[in-house]
Image (cartoon, rainbow, N blue to C red):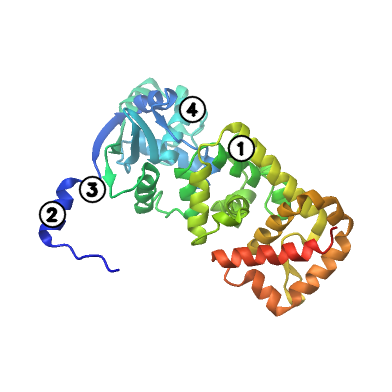
Amino acid sequence: MAKKKLTDKEIEELYESGIFKLTQERNDFLLPQILDFVNTKKWINLHPEYQRRLVWDRQKKSLFIESLIMNIPIPPIFLYEWDYSRFEVMDGQQRLSTIIEFYENRLKLSGLEQWESLNGKTFSELPPILKKAFDRRRISATVLLAESKVGERTPNELRKFVFERLNTGGQKLNAQELRNCIYSGHFNDMLIRLAGNDIFDDLWEIPRYSENIRSGQISKNLAENALFKRMTDCEIVLRYFAFKDKTKVKGSVKKILDDCMEREQNITATKANELENIFIDRLSACQAIFETYTFKLPEGKKGVKLSQPLFDAVMIAVDRLYSKKDELISHKKKIQTEFLKLLNDPNNYELVVGKPGTADAIKKRADFVFDFLKGYVN
């Protein structure tokens, strides 16, 4: 049924009621205040850079510090007041992290041209006048207040709504980057840990986190990896948890993934560890059964290629048959040969990769792999 068209008077009444109007205020903060707010947990959600993936290198951080020293205007940060006088940083994590890193003498300036003589110095090594000048610098903040209400939106939906209207660092966040910002907690942290698991990285041909992240610094090799750069690796992990329960696979893939993040947001650390172990067990079983063909589709003369839809299907099928994994592993060579033959049939190939973004397709390809594997167990 089409919605009733409102009159101008009704629209004005809605506006005056505040239902579709965000409440905000603007404040300027001295840089030492920022350090205090973060250290006392009044400002939260300063994700480590390797979680956000929109990474600033040392020169970019240094140029930002130089801009502050020179009192060049910088864009405001955005805060969300989730409780009275408690704020979540919605936009500006990199800037705030850089200020804190400099104050704590963990950043040595480099690549400066205007203040070349400051290269190699930390905050404590600045001349006294420059330190005082830095302490007098301010950063502006736009604060979205807790009493804001936009329609029937929950606090999470409100934050998501605002995030989607912001451009972070000039680059629009994708769906998984938004989830990482909005649904922080043990479940989100677990997704990041699993994306950095050595087995997962090897299977997806991602440079190992364990060898490419040191003290929060990311190697160029990992930073430029397509799956890592925009958190696609974390989304791949999420797909397993979102799709494995058939009853939860409804609507668009984006909604299914969002719903899973919201559903699991407040799980305990113990529960997150339990889920992490389940994922690693299933992943290891997939690798033991399919070996070099794990999550790979035949590509004619080109060989094989990694496939996210196939990952969904294989992980879910192995999860359902996990108690029979030893039987499946004992038949691994035959499974590999026959499965590749099966996927070489255009109809089967289309079943796996066709319409990958629909709930029905997710269920069908999982059932397809399950039925195939079930033939190798008693």
Q: Looking at this view, is 258 or 291 the one in front? A: 258
Give the farthest residue toward the top. 128
Q: Residues within 10 Å of mark 4 (few under 14, many from 20)?
A: some
Pointers 1 and 4 in contact (C-beta within 8 Å): no
Q: Is residue 347 above or below residue 317?
A: below
Left or right position of 155 against 368: left
Q: Quadrant of the N terminus?
A: bottom left
- Please tell me which of labels 1 and 2 falls first in the chain: 2
- Please tell me which of labels 1 and 4 falls first in the chain: 4
The amino acid marked with disc number 3 is Ile
The amino acid marked with disc number 4 is Thr
Please tell me which residue is depicted at 65% across the width and 36% down the height of the picture: 273
The amino acid marked with disc number 1 is Ala
Element class at badge 4 = loop
Residue 116 shows in this picture: yes
Element class at badge 2 = helix
Picture coordinates of residue 296, whole percent (x, y):
73, 64
Residue occupied by mark 3: 19
Number of numbered discs overlaid on the protein picture: 4
Pointers 1 and 2 in contact (C-beta within 8 Å): no
Quarter occupied by residue 86: top left
Please tell me which residue is depicted at 43% across the width and 39% down the height of the picture: 93
Q: How far is disc 3 from disc 2 in space, using C-alphas?
A: 11 Å
Q: Looking at this view, is 178 or 376 the one in front? A: 376
Residue occupied by mark 4: 122
Q: Looking at this view, is 196 or 22 the one in front? A: 22
Q: Looking at this view, is 375 or 259 the one in front? A: 375
Pointers 3 and 2 in contact (C-beta within 8 Å): no
The amino acid marked with disc number 2 is Glu
Residue occupied by mark 1: 272
